[in-house]
Image (cartoon, helix red, strand yellow):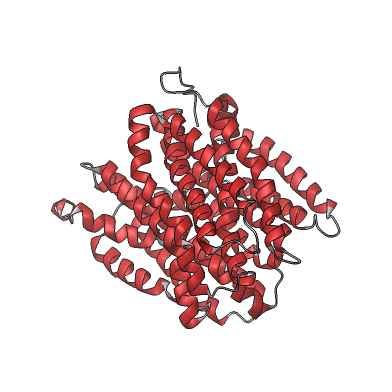
Amino acid sequence: MAGTKKTHKPWVLVLTIGLGTLLNPLNSSMISVALTRMQEDFELTFADASWLISVFYLASAAGQPVMGKLSDMFGPKRMFLAGLVTVATASMLAPFSPNFPFLLGCRALQAIGSSTLFPSGMSMVRTSITKGQAKALATLSIFASTSAAFGPSIGGLLIDSWDWPSIFIVNFPFIIVSFIMAIFILPEKGQGKFELARIDFLGISLFIIAVIGLILFLLSLDTQIHWWAFIIFAVASVSFYYYEKRQTEPFIDVNRLKKNPTVTLIYLQFITVNLVYYCYFFGFPTFLQQVKKYSPGDTGLIMLALAGFGVIVSPFVGRLIDRHGPKPALIIGSSILLTGTALLLTLHDTSSLSWLLVIMAVLGMSNGFSNISMQTALYEHVRPEDTGSASGLFQTSRYLGSILSSSLLGLAFNRHLDIQHLHNVALICLVFCALVLFLSIRLPGRGTKLEKLGV
């Protein structure tokens, strides 16, 4: 018992976990600047290269809930260390990839390993830090959001110096420091009962098959349409829905989603917000390098306009939500996203870099509004005991939006890339922006009777 009482200061625990949990958002964002070099090295179309984005988010979406349950079974410290080793293995192998499928496998392994770190880290924070737990969780959120925001800039500078393999090698300082600290600092928690039946393998498999079918169908729209892929998507989706309805521990609890339509629409809105935002997050670096001929390093610095303004407005958004609830912030964020997308149509071959930076800043601000306000809106409409599962599905919604964005870019940028193709993406995104604004206005405001029937 005396050994259990010997604990380290909370900030040391948070730092140890934070260094690990930043790996997923960092690696999901650095790839945006590396795509052009990978296209050249492996002789890929943009549609082929877009799988590097999709496979990472798909593996993260499927892996995170599984790893959360394995963390309960084997103990969070063991799973955290195992996750770091998995990311290290993938990061070591990726630079030596002999072909593109091997590199895709490394990206998937990297995603699974980094997806292990978040649920196991959250579990240790919740059980080890009782005083100031909210502050600890907020700090971990800053680790994640900052690494995602500045990933393109870090990646661009690395690629300028050491080419695309460097975005994998840069993981090692974080992995090594986090691993050493984890051995001595993370608390030893007793492992739970091993119950493999708790993991919804069939549900996850049907989900993966449905998403892959949808991606293959969408990417075929500019050539010979693969109707067989659409049939796979439709059959897997319907099978997934009816199978999940009967499960006691489903991958996605469709019964609760049916009972709480407000929350279902929040997830739909978050998918759509991320679809639009990540079209720009992954599209701009490719446009800047392939059309404007900027170096990866310069591209990374230019991307700070998109990422940085989201971080800058976040404190203001937090105060606005505290005073008036999430709905006004959501409406403002949706309006800014619509405005930024419309402004993108004014960009032409002769436009100055300063005008592009203004447009990127506007789009970046919209993301600062959307992320915090959507998360707050979600938690206002679910029961406290459902917060964990709601957060997991919120992340899955982010991943789905990102996957759809990479498919849209793969379709739009595949054959030829110029300013008109960027405009085509903006025109499609305008439709989605209008949907986001409509859903923001439709959301019940503060003081409305909330639906607290489930996630």
Q: Nearer the viewer, residue 205 or 337?
A: 337
Q: How many marks?
A: 0
Q: Position of residue 376 (x, y in %)?
A: 41, 35
Q: Nearer the viewer, residue 76 or 330?
A: 330
Depicted 250 relative to depicted 184: above or below: above
Visible in this render: residue 56?
no
Residue 59 at least partly seen: yes
Please give the name of the residue rendered at 29% of the width and 63% of the height, measured from the top-left corner: 182
283 and 419: which is toward the camera: 419
**Which residue is pictured at 58% across the width and 55% down the height?**
280
Considering depth in this image, is 62 or 336 the residue closer to the camera? Answer: 336
Where residue 256 sits: x, y (%)?
Answer: 55, 29
Relative height, residue 217 to residue 239 (above, below) = below
Indicate the quadrant where residue 226 lies. Answer: bottom right
Residue 297 coordinates in the image, percent (x, y): 48, 74
Q: Residue at x 30, y 52 (%)?
A: 189
In the depicted structure, whether residue 137 falls above or below residue 149: above
| Left or right of 148, for residue 435 | right
Q: Is residue 3 left or right of residue 230?
A: left
Q: Is residue 412 left or right of residue 383?
A: right
Rendering coords of residue 1 (x, y %): 16, 50
| Residue ID at (49%, 45%) | 366
User: Which residue lies most toward the left here?
Assistant: 2
